[in-house]
Amino acid sequence: MKMTEPGRLDRVPSLVEITRRGAFEASHRYWVPEWSAEENVRRFGPCTSPFGHGHNYTVEVTVRGPIDERMGMAINVVEVDRALATVIRRFDHRFINAEVAEFQAARLLPCVETLACSIRRAVSEELRAGGGDRRSGEGQGVGDSRAPTEVCVVAARVAEDETLAGVCEWRGPSPAGVALTPRPSPRGRGARGEGVPPVEEGRGLADVPQYPEAGMTPRTKGVAMGDAVASEVVSLVRSYTFSAAHRLHAAALTPEENRAIFGKCNNPYGHGHTYQLDVTITGAPDPRTGMVVDLAQLDAAVQDHVLGRVDHRHLNLEVPPFDVVNPTSENVARAIWEWLAPVCPGPLAAITLHETPRSRFTLRQEEA
């Protein structure tokens, strides 16, 4: 790394992303009041219980901004933590449907996709309200303050457990900070007519900005919109596991070459793994549920076309095409994509195959 002047780094990127993590405990339910009870149960199963059910949620937020030359930081992480903690307190130990304003009156279902969008926007607003303070932490002295529009919350990830997460990514104009103002929402009664508190005007599903019909009015903060279209990209990540054996052996190589390249993985009897498969669906959230895919349909597709083929199987001996294709994790991921993409109930954006805790392999839509 070349340093052109003492104490200065040159030819090094100055735009950095910082991710911080938090957690909260909450309950929720899925229920669309204009649907019949039968349709709600068909779509959401036990998640329709009027008493709710709960999760230990984990949250990650990612902010992006330029590194200040004097302070050596894009933003004080204390400020990110403060903003995230403030937002999390709105959800922690709450029944989200009844106690968090934007989810009241069944205006918005608290699925992981909508929670990720809600938290990303709320943390962004908290950072702006706090001025994006750039002062260093306790014991490090006092520095200057960064204008709030120079740092942008570019992503939030909310997981309700190890198998299901929602991701909301900002793909709008650069970190100059575009704010989005929703049109006022009507006030009304609760999902089952219990008269929960009226919905406060605020952000919700109708605020997803890439869908003009959703009722958004762009409002710039410190920048001109120009031709740029403010947008969020929303994804669901669903994880599955399967157990399988395989042997790494390439027919195009000699036995000696196979042993030299694959080592103990070339054992003629094979070996095995408990694989984890992450399926990422990215698309337009349903205007009523906020979900990007019907989870039951996704689970069925993965079970029928992937897990049913590979779980508790020896890939080389029982699962075509691995009778002729070397079942490396790269090739297993490619086969899974080929099996799943044609039947996937939503836009398949990525699959990640975890072979061991140390190794994972990802294919993305643009590279498939």
Image (cartoon, grey):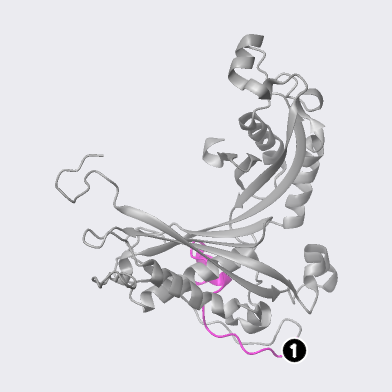
Residue 59's image quarter?
bottom right
- Residue positioned 43% across, 70% down in the render: 124
Q: Is residue 215 magenta?
A: yes
Percent x, y of residue 76: 35, 67
- 126 lies left or right of 332: left
Q: Is residue 177 above or below residue 50?
A: above
Q: Residues within 10 Å of mark 1 (few under 14, many from 20)?
A: few
In the current view of this chain or complex, which residue is farthest to the right? 38
Q: Nearer the viewer, residue 182 or 133?
A: 133
In the current view of this chain or complex, which residue is farthest to the front? 139
Q: Nearer the viewer, residue 237 or 133?
A: 133
Principal secondary structure, stretch drawn in magenta: loop
Percent x, y of residue 311: 80, 38
- Residue positioned 59% across, 82% down in the render: 101
Residue 69's image quarter?
bottom left
Chain part drawn in magenta:
193-218
Q: Is residue 330 above or below residue 240?
A: above
Q: Is residue 158 above or below residue 181?
A: above
Q: Is residue 89 magenta?
A: no
- Residue positioned 60% across, 87% down in the render: 187
* Residue 216 can be seen, yes or no: no
Percent x, y of residue 224: 30, 65
Percent x, y of residue 143: 24, 70
Circle 1: element type: loop
* Residue 113 can be seen, yes or no: yes
- 104 lies left or right of 87: right
**Residue position marked by numbered label 1 in the rendering:** 194
- 305 lies left or right of 112: right
Instruction: Please name the amino acid that badge 1 sits on.
Output: Glu
